[in-house]
Amino acid sequence: MSSEGFIGYKMKEHALGMQLITNNNIFFEFVPFDSNNFDADGNVKPDAEALLIDEVEYGKDYAILLNTNAGSWRYLIGDTIRFLNVEKCEVVITGRTKHFLSLVGEHLSVENMNCAIEKANNHFNISIPEYTVTGFPYKNYFAHKWYIATDDNVDPNELLKFIDDTLKAINDDYATERTSALSDIFIEILPEEKFLKFMELRGKLGSQNKFPRVMKGNMLENWDKFLATGKI
């Protein structure tokens, strides 16, 4: 369920994905989520390629355009999906078009980040309820910085190395760029309260609002200001 319409449902209790509903007054289009169709900020390009349901491929990520009989026309809902079964239209949500990081071709998705954080939770026996990542130029190359929310004791350097190694193992593009243009990664551990306070100041505190997994543009400026002054 989404505010734009009833998009899909889980077919059985332990299903990995959900089945798109293709006969409920929604016409779907699928935009391949890659650099040919989206810019570095996650905005769809004017000449982006849009595919129909019979043109999608297994295992590839797509952004969804919705056309509905309520008047929505080619509305980009912002979620990215991957087809687990093309014939049955079974998909899994992999992230958001705005929440990915690819400064130099590392193609770091929310799915990758969530996987690394989940593994870190289990490995160090800690709780990381929130996190965000930003990228920036650094010493003629580029770098990432992780902001991790946890109230548990953990060595920052060990945590960062574990996250980095996990991402290298699950994302070949990231592993390649970590040997070249993506020269460094950094980490700052913060109490969970910091993340909650930032959302409160933005008027976004509550279960319907999610902390951005990637910080860019004005949001990053507000985050930096908040960390420095406590205000936005």
Image (spheres, rainbow, N blue to C red):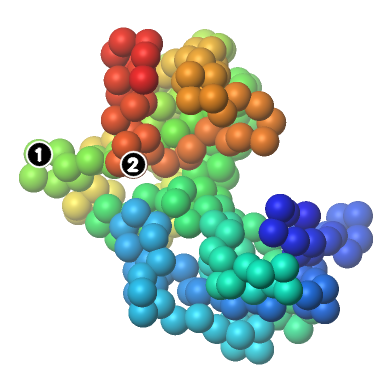
Q: Where residue 48 sits in the image (x, y, percent)? A: 40, 77
Mark 2: which secondary structure?
Answer: loop
Quarter of the picture containing the C terminus is top left
Give, as a three-letter code, the residue at label 1. Lys
215 in relation to 178, above or below: above
Instruction: Give the residue number, with chain letter if any, for mark 2.
Output: 216
169 in relation to 219, above or below: below
Q: Which mark is residue 17?
A: none
Quadrant in the rendering for residue 156: top left
40 in relation to 36, above or below: above
Instruction: Look at 44% across and 34% down and name the residue there.
Output: 132
Instruction: Give the residue number, with chain letter if any, for mark 1.
Output: 139
Q: Is residue 39 left or right of residue 27?
A: left
Q: Is residue 53 left or right of residue 101?
A: right
Q: Where residue 8 sits in the image (x, y, percent)? A: 78, 64
Mark 1: which secondary structure?
Answer: loop
Instruction: Look at 36% across and 70% down and name the residue there.
Output: 45
